[in-house]
Image: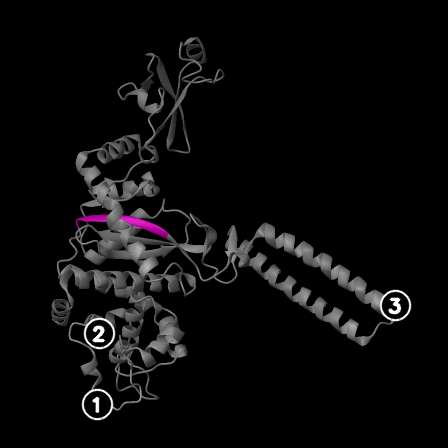
Amino acid sequence: MAYRYGKRHEQSLFPASIEDYVPSDAPVRVYDVFVDALDFGDLGIELDSCKVGNSSYDPRSMLKLLVYGYSYGIRSSRKLERETHYNLSFIWLTGGLKPDHKTIAEFRRKHKGALRKVLKQCARLCLKLNLIAGNTLFVDGSKVRANASLSHHWTEDRCLKRLEKIDGRIEEILSECDLADDQESGIGSLVAIQEELSDQQTLRRKVQDTLKQLQSAQKASINTTDPDCVRIHGRQGSHAGYNMQSVIDEKEGLIVHTDVVNDNNDLGQISDQVEGAHEVLDKPCKTVCADAGYCNYDELEKLDGEDIKLVVPSKRQASKKPAKPFDKSKFEYDSENDVYICPAGQTLSYRYTREGKKKDYMAGVSVCCQCCYFGECTTNSRDGRKIVRYVNEEFRERLESEYEQPDSQAIYELRKQKAELPFGHIKRNLNADHFLLRGLDGVRAEASLLASCFNLARMITLIGVPALIAKLAN
């Protein structure tokens, strides 16, 4: 069977317009219309074609380049520059503009605040298209690597140890200098020794500056490459990184709000993230669902005051371990007399309140020691059995009871597919398992872009290219 061979040098008549190369149902047309639909004044990007001075690239074309590139996992400014030369869809999208990588990187750096607002407008477009309902919201977080290394992560202890090592080396070098003088060594060896001494003294100043930063900022650690990132502990070990948060709507699994924080866990995040989503939706939601990592009762009480149904398991419920025979749940609370009744019928009376929120209840020592369950219920022969009741215990019990209801279980079952899908798409399909920009402002801008790209991909799947173009154009 004969092969088919290309004819690279054969003359042919190509269409005169770039427009003719891009089909009417090509996804790139959605990105073109989407960026045109954004309110650049609200983003904080000035559009002034009559500006005096050297002509700059149209901000709309630059934003289209970034959004489209991020949607296909192309985030590097050098790679984006290459695409504008060789990729037909990029050439069509930018209208033939070919900004160099420095211009692309500078636009992204200069407009970090604007990029952070892109998701807000994207989510509101989805709301307008009836793709977001805003009734049930899922909150989830994921660890994302920073553009920094742990080798540049410093603690006060590490600084002090390094300074001690540097001082020791400086003393050795000074001794070598004295020895070289005594032996009248060649000029070359003295120059080499003096260069090393200068290097060690420079390094010492840098470590001292880092130590001063740590002490003035009152931080446990600091990364000299990206001071905002923290040491993140994840399934793949420890690395410098951030905690990316997202709020997802139940209806079509679209992202309503995203944020990036430099906390190692999610315990203090849920109220801020839900409030951010409310600002986008311009209304409060009815239900919030999250995993046990968000079970911070002080945080959850803030949302409970807004009459929102909370579907968040406690750590005990998430572990799914059966309660021990003499677990706190086996003790009955008598609210009228403010006492606990143990399984053996004995009374645990209130003793004192700790930290303003923990109330301790104890049985008499003699009672516990004579009980047939001593050794199973408690082995504390000095104080007897103790039960801790929190000031907001009723709220905790109500939250646990709410989670166990059939309708709440149905909502929680949806959590994994709704809340975790966006992170899977962003990290795997968009190749964004790490941030390129540094600092909280930079990574928040990237997170907004990535979330918008996920939403656009979902919108294309749900509506289709031609219909979506028509809707966005209106």
Amino acid tagged 1: Leu
Front in this rendered view, residue 274 or 322: 322
| Image spot of residue 372 (x, y percent) | 40, 9
Front in this rendered view, residue 310 or 44: 310
Query: Residue 32, which numbered label?
Result: 2
> In the figure, is residue 452 to the left or right of 435?
left
- Label 3 – label 1 distance at C-alpha: 84 Å
- Decide which of tag 2 and tag 1 comes sooner along the chain: 1
Amino acid tagged 3: Asp
Task: Give the extent of the magenta segment.
Answer: 135-142
Front in this rendered view, residue 303 or 91: 91
The quadrant holding residue 125 is: bottom left
| Image spot of residue 166 (x, y percent) | 68, 59
> In the figure, is residue 434 to the left or right of 202?
left
Residue 15 visible somewhere in the drawing: yes
- Decide which of tag 2 and tag 3 comes sooner along the chain: 2
